[in-house]
Every structure is written in C-alpha cells, then in structure tokens.
Amino acid sequence: MNAPENKQQFRLVGTRPVRPDGVEKVTGKAIYSPDFVAPGMLQGAVLRSPHPHAHIRGIDTKKAEALAGVKGVVTGQDFPQAADKLVAGAESASNLRWVAQKCMAIGKVYYEGQAVAAVAATSQAIAEAALKLIEVDYEVLPHVIAIEDALAQDAPVLHDDVFTQGLAEKPAKPSNASMRFAIERGDAKAAIAGAAASFTGCFTLQPVHQGYIEPHACVAQWQADGQAQIWCSSQGHFAIRAMTAGILQIGIADIRVHPLEIGGGFGGKTTVYLEPVAMLLSKKAGRPVRLTMKRTDIFRSTGPAPGAVIDITLAAAADGTLLGTEIEFKYHGGAFPGANEVYSGVGGAVGHYRVPNASIVGWNVLSNIPTMHAYRAPGAPQINFAVESAMDELAAQLGIDPIDLRLKNIVHPGEPSASGVPLGAIGYAEALEAAKAHPHWSSPVEAGQGRGVACGFWGNYGGPSTASVKLGEDGSVLVTEGSPDIGGSRASMAIMAAETLGVAYEKVRVTIADTSSIGFSMVTGGSRTTFATGKAVIQATEGVIEQLKDRAARTWGVDVAVVTWEDGAAVHGDQRLTLAQIAAKTGTTGGPISAEAVVDPHDFLPGFGVHICDTAVDRETGHVLVKRYTVVQDVGRAIHADYVEGQMQGGAVQGIGWALNEAYVYDRSGKLDNAGFLDYRMPVASDMPMIDTVMVEVPNPAHPYGVKGVGEVPIVPPLAAVGNAVSRATGIRMHDLPISPDRVYGLLRAAE
Amino acid sequence: MSSPAYHAPETIEQAVALLAGDAGARPLAGGTDLIVQMRSGRNAPSAIVDLKRIAGLSGIRALPGGGFAIGAATACTSLKDDAALAAAWPGVVEAANLIGSVQVRNRATMAGNLCNASPAADSVPALVAAGATCLVAGPNGEREVPVEAIPASPGRTSLAPGEVVIEIRLPAQLGGDAYLRSIPRTEMDIAVVGAGVSLVLDAGGVCTSARVAIGAVAPTVVLVEAAGTALVGTRFDDAALEAAADAVRAACKPIDDKRGTAEYRTAMAGVLVKRTVRIALERAHNNQGRSQA
C-alpha cells in the first residue's frame, strides 16, 4: 500500500465536492442534540452548586417531588457507589469515579456549577421551578483557584486521598499536585551553563474553553426491562456508551447510543456530563428525559483546557544549534485528577527539535475549577507558547533569521521522535521551506507592525475503527461507520470509497451508525478519523471489490485471479461488467454484496505546522490587530481540500483567540465571572484577516491515500506566533496570555 | 411559571394606561435587552406592552428647522438607511449601529438603549453630546426632557410610573459629531469606554460650542461640561485637546471589573475623547465647506 507519488492519478482525492450533510445543515434542518424529540419526553433541569468548595450535609427534595408535573428527582445518592475503575474508549482511559462526579456531586462539591441535583418534569418551566424547591445543606469550605495558590503550604486540599503520583516515594500527605511527569536526558544544566546564548523566562496562561456552539444535550430512555437508548451528539458514542454503562453499572449491550449531528466539540465532547443523569431521571420517571445545558452551565461545568505556569530556559551555541533546555510547568488541572495533558506537554515541548540535553518536568495541579478536558492538541499549545517564544528570543539574540534557526534544529525522518520511536515520512523541513518561500515571509513588515513566526506539531493517532460497505441493488454504495463527523469526514469517506471503487462521488452515501449497528470505533479525536476510519472504509471497499470480481468471474466462468478491477468495472480481456451491472444481478449470483473491516492502525504520523503572523499594536490603547496570517502545514495528503484548509484556518483562529482575549476570569468568591460569550471573548469574524493556507503534501506511506491527521496541529503554533509578533511590534516580550488591550497598555506604559 | 401578559396597544394613551395600571408592566420596543433579561431570570415583568403597533412610533420625521424626530420603536438599522439623518448626525447613527450584531440592530432601538439605563449604552453618549431630547408620555401628559435626564443609575431610569419614552429628538446639525468606543474585539461587544462629541465652529474654525459625553466610566453616561469648555474658543490645538482629555479623566468614576480596570478605563477615556474630537472636527469642517459651497 504505497502512497502514489503523483496526485494527478487520483480522480477524486484532493477535490472539493459538496458535502453530503451540507444542505441539511445550511437550511437548519439537521438534528443536533437539543433538537431531538422522543415521544412522551420529559424536560429535565439541573441544580448546580453556588459554592466552589463545600461538603453536602444533606439534600431535601421532598418539596420538589411534591410539585405537580414533577416526575423524578435525582441526586448523587442515586448514583451507584463509584470506585476507581478505568474505562477506555476516549483518547485516554477515564477513571469512572471522577467522571461520575463531573455528572453529579456525590457528598462534596469541588467547583461552582457542579451539578448537585436534577429534576424531570412535564415542562421546562416546572422542572426549573422544582429546582428552587430543593434544599441543599452546604458546609462551605475554603476554596482555591489559581495554580500557585493551590500549591501553597496552607492551601485547602481538595482530596484527602490524592497523593502526588510520579514521585520516587509516595508522599506522606495528600496534595493538590496530583501528578509529576518528567523527561531527563543528558546534562541540561551543564549544557546551558556553557552555551553562547540562552533565554530564561516564566510564561502564564489562563484556562480557556473549547467554545463549541452546540450545547451539551441528550435524550435518555431507560426502560423497565433494563434496556436503554440515548440520543446525543458527541465525538464518540461508543465512549458515551462505555462511560454511561460503567457509571450506572449496566451491560454494554443494554445501552444503544444514537449519534446526532454535532455542533462542534474540539475535544470537549469526548466524555459524559449529562447522559448518566438523564438515564437515572428516565428510570425514575418511566419516560424519556431530555437534558440541555445553558451556556453558563457549559462554561462552569465542562472541561476548559488547562491554564499554565511555565518556567523555561533554552540555550544555543553561537551558530544557533540548540544545546539544552530546562522546563518546569504546572497545568491547571481543575477539580479531579486523571487528565493526560501533562504527558503530552512534557513529550511535546521540544519534540520538534533536536535538543540533546533536556530536563522537562510537568505537574498537574488541582483547584476548585471544572476539571480540564481535551481541547484540540490537548496540552500542546501551552508548552509550545513558552518554547516558541524562547526560540524567538534566541533568534533575536543571535541575529539569526527565525525560520533559519528552526531549520537548523528541526527533527528529520529517521531521527528519534519525542517517544523515542524513529520518525517516519514527516514533512517538517518541507513546511519550513514553503513558509520561507511564501510571499508573506518576504514582504516588508509594515511600519508599526511586528511579524512573528512559530512552529508546532501534534503526534496524531490511529486506533480502532469499524466500517462496512454495502451495495444497493441499483449500484449505489452505502458506507456505514462509527466515527462522528465533525469536520466533513463523511465527504472524505465517500471520496475514498468512490476513488477505490472507481465510481462517482455521488454514488456513495455515508451513515454514522449507532452503537448497536456498527462495531466499536474510538472517538473522533487525536486527528484520527480520516486516517484510521478511512483505512477501515478503504479495506471494506476492497472487500467489496473482491466480491464483485468473484461475481464477474463466476458469470464469465473464469478464475477470479484473472479478473481485474478497473474504473468501476470488472475486466477480463475485452469483457467488462460494471459495478451497477453486477449489483443488479446479485439476486442470482450469490446474494447481497457487503464487507466489513475492523482496523487498529498505529502507523500514523505526526503533523508539523509553521505559522506567520503580522500584528499592529495601538500604542495608545494597547489594542492588537492581526493584519496578516499564514498557516503552512504538512497535511500528508488532503482528501477533501476544503476541509483540510478549514481545519488549518479554524485551528489558527482558536489559537489567536487564546492568545488575544480568551480566559476564564474568577472573582474572589471563586465564581466564574465571565460564563457567557459576551465576556468570554472568542474572536469574531471582523477580528480576523483572511487566514492564508499552504498545504504541504508529504504523504504517509502507510495510508493508501497518504493521510496524516490535520485537525489539531494548527492550534499549536498561534499562541507564540501572535506573542512573537506583538513582542517584535512593541519591543516587549509577551510572557502572559491573554495579550488583552489593558495588559499591553500596562506593559507599554511601564516600559516608558 | 405564569407567563407575562402581552399587550399590543395601538395608541400612546392605551400604552400609558396599561403601564400605569400595572407596576410590573414593562414597555417593549426591540426587546433585545428585555427578552434576554427575562430569559436569564434578571427581569420578570407581569406584563409586556409592545410599542411597535402604535402609529408614529416607528420611523424618522424631519422637524421644522432641520432637526429630526425618531420614534421610540425605530430600529437602529433604519437610522442608517435614512440618508438625511445619517448625513446630519453620523456620530449618533454610527453609535446606534455599534450595538450588538446586525440581527440585534434590526430590532434594537435607541429609546430602548436609553431606557435600559446601562452606563455602557453606545447610543447614549452620542445622543447626549448631540443635545438630543426625548418626549416622554405619561398619565399626566407629555413632557420633553434632555436625554441625559433619563438614566438614574445602572438599570434604573428617572421615568415615573406609567411613563414611557415615545420619541427622541435631535436638533439641526450646526457642526459635526462623532462617537468612538473602546472594546477588546472589533464588534459584538460592550463598551469599556465610550465617548461622544458634538462641535460647532465659526467661519474661522474656532470652536463656538462643544459637548462631550462619556460612557461606561460612571454609574450613568456623563456630560462633561468642563471638557466642552476646554475646547470652546480654541482651534483644537494639542493643548486644548489635552485640557479636554484632562477634564474627561477627572470626570471618570469607573469601577474595576472583568471588562477593564478603573485605571485603564480612565486612561482610555482621555485617549478616546481626543480621537473623537478629531473626527467630529473633520466632519464640522466638511459641513462648513458644504454649506459655503
């Protein structure tokens, strides 16, 4: 399965056909999570804690239950006793003990907005009125929000059974530092001491939200016989099934999860917050129950990406060769331990450069905010902001062009990756050369502006996927898969199946099936879907081609070995049977044609990006405007070019928002002060220039069409690309995000 | 769980009677503040009195002498579409068209923006600078008051029970006006600071009248008379602009909040006023050129 060298030989791969879900979406007819209606459905509402840290002495639900129209009330006491239990299915294993408490507090609340009770009623108004009748007896505890405060000697400790993992010895006392992970190689201290140039700095970032427009919502129906159905949008309905079954201690086959259209996830919809609660309400009420989060609930109770405090020293020889680095960072883990970001932060910090001597230490720090959750390249943008800012400082110190400094130090195919495994056919050097050759890089920097460049990478993933391909009697092609379509993957699957079969794109229709109708597929995350599920679709398509050739061979009375498949038809000498001709006769040649493939590939490749950013800074007000932005990325090979470019632009915009304005703001009482899109400022269209994209295609030889993951790489470099641009425009290093007008104003005045 | 009553009166008298008869009733024009407040639980009126069916409350009338009367239910977008108004009072029209998004402005009104009584209301500093008045209808008939007399404190107006703003009146334009605001993004935001300026010049370019109003730096929009005084009699040299900025900064009594620190807001008020004066000045010169031509 070598990736063909010449793009021209593909009929469909790399083209831009209309997506099959497009018309439904732009006409507002697609069914997203909050749209789904089940017959007899009740409306649910969730009571949330006003306190960031408190024991629950008791909850009195009697008045709520007595309200006319209320059909069920659920509290933490209704949840089965949750012990430590790891469940796979999402990007990392999840400990159900913590996942359950993200759905509902069990005896203690750890952050403002944590669910403490829920009601199902015949109307939304009744459900919300019933919440006001629930009496919760809180014993309010001292809270802690900021990373450094949570590590203080006298800080309130969230969990008396969480001891720092990853130390040589188990500590004597529990701690908010839930884990430490480190990579040590060579002698970083000595290398830094002897270096011609070095930069030392401390960088800080605040928690930011994934910001998907569609709220979390679900409808659950738990029947009296124990069987259940859930309708929801997620990045992986098999993960929803696994976690819901695990928390409620019921059998996998007894829950059928139906995927609905998803309105954005970005990593944030790989877990459950509502589904187990809706299930318990449905069980009590004996009817289907819908739960929908309000925006304020989403900000207060679903995973932000972690904030960070990062100390870094990076050192180079006079010619720019990197010699060593010392990094110690703390990620803002939130209420519960167990997230993966510290591992990827340590592994990804300088994984895109050759740094012979490195000491990289990461800590996860718990505090009274919602638990961090995956957000597009989880754990990478934070550490990358510090590393790429330090690279910019070294380039300036040494008088070396920032792209040349990177070219001198990048990893190449065959060299060890961050995990030690040799790198495959990566296109990092090609991406940097393309950036250097781009007119943006050679254009003069306009007066009053600054230009920044930053690089970044993401490891991507493969993992398990199932797909089946069936033929319709009229020669149409039905692809069934289990990977929710977030970024146009149905179009990509149809392109790959049609390309492989040699039929028109429009002949192929793709369905994302429920958990009982297709085999296990991991979440749409880790930039894995077009790669791994794509492999499953191609394999199943090849299985169908084998059957088609077999039917043709039988028709002609020849050995199947002499039949070839060319341009959508079986061929033997001058005989030819098209797919449609064979499909029409399946009733008399052996029955329907269908094939399934199950894959678990691990020959994925990382992706590398180079971002160039020009900013103008208003020196009187501190406002930063992004004037020009270019994203260059090794994308393997684009299957549907629009959706690859769209990922590059979307990732860049999210990263720019993180750099300039997005941040969780807590007040002194430990409450989130900006739990809405007005004061949690994501970029609006007028904030952005057209984001220029350059797809560099260095195919992955392990994929029939050369696919590499593309969705996460583009959020990694923008934080530093913007920071470097503003630093060069102002002459002041930007250490702290967001680079908001009042912060820049303060830095400019202080420098005067 | 009881929903508010909805009334759609066809005369001002009916509207006033409905408002006067129910202390919990609230008038509705565009609804872009009221409905949002009801959804979030911040406001629970017993009745809604929709002003949009009342004849004459939607639309813009030219007044004798060159002024304009803008009905209370006139959407902000319509202001932009009125060529004469947009040419005469670009600062007011631009301010009203910074509120929310396009969709919001297709519903939202300046009268609603005024009576929502937010210190950060974008149209209000521009209206105050313009010397606008409003016509208030109530149980005791109609009265005309300066726009700046309406907001009393954040979320509260000086309107008596049963009173409702039915019209905003702008005088004839004798010079030029402008409004600028400071927000972290480029749109879809709430002013961290807003500044409205209206100027009149004599034939020699000397300032004969100046009104400066600032928003989001005090409990209500503030008319800074000292800033206007600092400009009158000058040709807007740097010292005059700096004196106006000083007066504005002195008038600021902002709070520290998530949208900005008191220090930043005060500093920005000074920066914005100077920038706003320059735009208003250019417009005043252009108007002078036009009227001489």
Image (tube, helix red, strand yellow):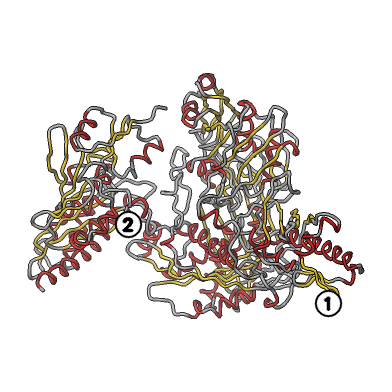
Depth order, front residue of A433/A296: A296
Determine crowd level at label 2: few under 14, some 14-19, many 20+ residues with C-alpha closer than 10 A. Answer: many
Q: Which residue does the numbered mark 2 point to in the structure image?
A: B182
Residue B274 shows which numbered tag?
none
Depth order, front residue of A520/A15: A15
Determine crowd level at label 1: few under 14, some 14-19, many 20+ residues with C-alpha closer than 10 A. Answer: few
Left or right of B86? Residue A94 is: right
Do labels 2 and 1 touch, CB within 8 Å? no
Chain of the residue where label 2 is placed in the rendered structure:
B
Depth order, front residue of A535/B91: A535
* Image spot of residue A360 (x, y percent): 65, 59
Q: Quadrant of the C terminus of chain B?
A: bottom left
The answer to whether residue A559 is visible is: yes
The answer to whether residue A423 is visible is: no
Q: Quadrant of residue A321?
A: bottom right
Chain of the residue where label 1 is placed in the rendered structure:
A
Give the CA separation, mark 2 to mark 1: 75 Å
Q: Which residue does the numbered mark 1 point to in the structure image?
A: A574
Left or right of A585? Residue A125 is: left
